[in-house]
Amino acid sequence: MQVIDWIILILYFAIIFGIGLFAYWKVKDSADFFTAGGKLPWWLSGISHHVSGYSGAVFVAYAGIAYTHGFSLYVWWACGVGLATLLAAIWVAPRWANLRIEANIQSPTEYLLQRYNLPVQQIIAWSGSLTKVFDVGAKLAAIAVLLNTFTGSSLTFGILLTGGVSLLYIIIGGLWADVWNDFAQFVIQLLAGLTMFIMILIKLDDGIGGVFSVWDRLPESNSQLFSDPYTPAFALSMLLINFFSYSGGTWNLSTRFISSTNKKEARKAGILSSALYFFWPLILLFPMFAAPVFFTDLEDPTVSYGKMAMEFLPAGLIGLVLASMFANTLSMTSSDSNTVSAVITRDILPVIFPSVRKFDSKKSLILARVTTFTFTALTILVALNASHFGGVFGLIISWFAALLGPIAIPMILGLLPPFRKSGSNAALISIAGGLAAFIATKLFTVTNLALQVATPMLASLVLYTVIGFISGKDNSLTTKESTTPS
């Protein structure tokens, strides 16, 4: 890192704080803090949904997979997420927007009290909040690995720096700060990604044809659509998980739909996010695919992207790429902090302390900022101990992805009319069954990655559907959303 690289990185942090201060004046109450007052335009919501869906972990854990397994990463990750988001845009996104309009929700778990009952809402709210601690912790650990590669700083310093920056601006500006940072991050990512793409093509010395000829210089398996353990079964498992995740099971993504002005705008936002997932990763991931050409037999493939940036980019552009990686991570961690804070403030604390329900707008806003601080502090602690949970990839896939299903199944399917007969009993049993399946995969050491990831979600899905079918009781929402076609 040269002086100019540090200057660019510092300028990026200045922009982030500037966005936070700008957003501060738009936040008057908890509705503004958590849902931007329901005034997000579709293009801003769509871009925010897209960039909030992945973080610096892409440049660490996924860069390692691209190095060892090649193009299969695009198939099971980018294409899978693109298709899952498109389905979510059609079926689910409009219903989230209508829930804010009809039921005045500010958190994604708020409607569960009406759809099921208090125990279901509390179990999902608590378990989802705890799961998110692991997920966000993984993202902080990932960016610390990148910072270590670029600057030689310790992992602890990187985690504290990233978590601290995220903490400051999201507490100041809430969701408005988050989505405008997402937009700035998207612009920075475009510049950095295109720069890396062009530089690698130049180094391959084959012009634009390098996009195709590079595969002849890589192991044959790297050009395959599927490469063990990332098999078709694993891709289908991830598609199922990603549908529930990107339709709102990952709470910060549901907030982008909830905050849209109406259901049509929410659908357009989802379609934009989907299109970006299909096309942008082809450019973003290309340098990762090409890494083995320049660095053979890396002991730690997760550092491949950082090594290429340090090796091939001139001074100044290194700082831009690092800023892009920081922006990716801050986008996701800050939006998670904001959304989990909404769940804690709106759905958990009022049950524990009923007096919270009587807070005026000023006290509610203060409480929102306190819960955001507390949640982020916990994620920093998890990040500092990421090695105890299987590292970054272990946290993302083995823990978060596997635990997502039992929580997301009743949450997302509860929005859809075909599952209106699945009530509170179906929800509780499906959650318990999914968690039991997750524990079983750990106790009996399931080695098949597809089975390890999919088993908890499939168990929850089957239980939720079958028990609802047996009950025969209509548990539809009583808002207009339950009867209005999407």
Image (spheres, grey):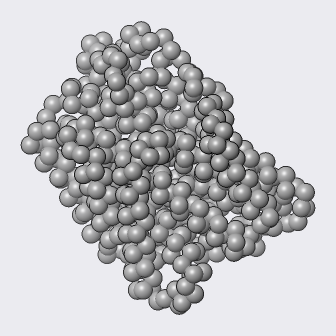
Q: Nearer the viewer, residue 277 or 251?
A: 251
Q: Residue at x 39, y 51 (%)?
A: 385
Q: Residue furthest top?
A: 216
Q: Position of residue 283 (x, y in %)?
A: 39, 30
Q: Residue at x 78, y 54 (%)?
A: 464
Q: Which quadrant, please, contains the N terminus? A: top left
Asked if residue 220 is positioned above or below residue 411 in the image, the reply reads: above
* In the displayed structure image, the side of residue 199 where residue 101 appears, left or right: right
Q: Residue at x 64, y 55 (%)?
A: 408
Q: Is residue 208 visible?
A: no
* In the displayed structure image, the side of residue 362 where residue 274 appears, left or right: right
Q: Residue at x 15, y 31 (%)?
A: 314
**Location of residue 109 (image quadrant):** bottom right
Q: Which quadrant, please, contains the C terminus? A: bottom right
Q: Position of residue 427 (x, y in %)?
A: 74, 61
Q: Is residue 389 visible?
A: yes
* In the displayed structure image, the side of residue 106 where residue 123 appears, left or right: right
* In the displayed structure image, the side of residue 25 where residue 110 appears, left or right: right
Q: Position of residue 245 (x, y in %)?
A: 58, 50
Q: Position of residue 54 (x, y in %)?
A: 44, 45
Asked if residue 139 is positioned above or below residue 265 in the image, the reply reads: above
